[in-house]
């Protein structure tokens, strides 16, 4: 017999290898928000499928990301970190909003600080809860 090392490992499905982790989804969102703060004309390219007479076709559109930040009455910048487009990642339970400061530089600093915490894995449980909430919001469809 051949002198080969054998294994029972199976090849992963293409859909599994393309799927982003929760960390990646939040980090992508944070990077888009940082770019949006730096450049208000920043856009993200997205694919849309349009149904037509000949069937559905894929179209690429460029839209600005929806801002996660806003200004309070006193001028203080506030931000909520989101998983995807709607589910808020609560950094602490029942406290979803972060007070960022008065300037855009403060806001960018807070977003970068959150990004480093996400990369370190210290917000994984909060991201998982937001991911579950997002799944419920879209009707429990599979990923």
Image: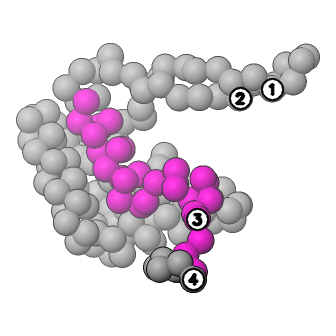
Q: Quadrant of residue 141?
A: bottom right
Q: Earlier in the sequence, mark 1 or mark 4?
A: 4
User: In the rendered image, which residue does mark 2 sit on?
Assistant: 49
Q: Earlier in the sequence, mark 4 or mark 2?
A: 4
* Residue 90 horizontal/vertical position (percent): 34, 66
Using the image, determine if residue 6 lies above or below residue 74: below
Q: Earlier in the sequence, mark 3 or mark 1?
A: 3
User: In the rendered image, which residue does mark 4 sit on?
Assistant: 1
Q: How many marks?
A: 4
Residue plotted at (41% across, 32% down)? 65
In the rendered structure, does residue 26 fall within the stretch colored magenta?
Answer: yes
Residue plotted at (66% across, 56% down)? 138
Find the distance from the CA under tag 3 to the CA under tag 4: 25 Å
Residue plotted at (42% across, 61% down)? 22
Mark 4 neighbour density, 10 Å: few (under 14) some (14–19) many (20 or more)? few
Using the image, determine if residue 21 lies above or below residue 104: below
Q: Which residues are magenta?
A: 7-35
Find the distance from the CA under tag 1 to the CA under tag 2: 6 Å
The disc label shown at residue 11, or none? 3
Q: Earlier in the sequence, mark 3 or mark 4?
A: 4
Give yes or no for contact between labels 1 and 2 (Cβ–Cβ under 8 Å). yes
User: In the rendered image, which residue does mark 1 sit on?
Assistant: 56
Secondary structure at badge 3 equals loop
**Which-is-in-front pick, marks 3 and 2?**
3
Q: Earlier in the sequence, mark 3 or mark 2?
A: 3
**Left/right of residue 74 with respect to residue 134 in the rendered view:** left
Residue plotted at (59% across, 71% down)? 10
């Amino acid at each position: 017999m051949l002198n080969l090392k054998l294994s029972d490992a199976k090849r992963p499905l293409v859909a599994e290898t393309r799927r982003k982790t929760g960390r990646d989804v939040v980090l992508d969102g944070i990077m888009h928000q940082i770019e949006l703060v730096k450049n208000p004309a920043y856009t993200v390219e997205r694919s849309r499928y349009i149904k037509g007479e000949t069937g559905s076709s894929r179209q690429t559109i460029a839209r600005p990301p929806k801002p996660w930040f806003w200004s309070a009455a006193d001028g203080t910048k506030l931000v909520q970190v989101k998983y995807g487009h709607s589910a808020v990642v609560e950094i602490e339970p029942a406290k979803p909003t972060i007070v960022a400061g008065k300037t855009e530089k403060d806001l960018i600093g807070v977003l970068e600080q959150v990004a480093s915490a996400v990369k370190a894995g210290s917000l994984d449980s909060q991201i998982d809860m937001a991911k579950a909430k997002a799944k419920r919001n879209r009707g429990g469809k599979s990923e």
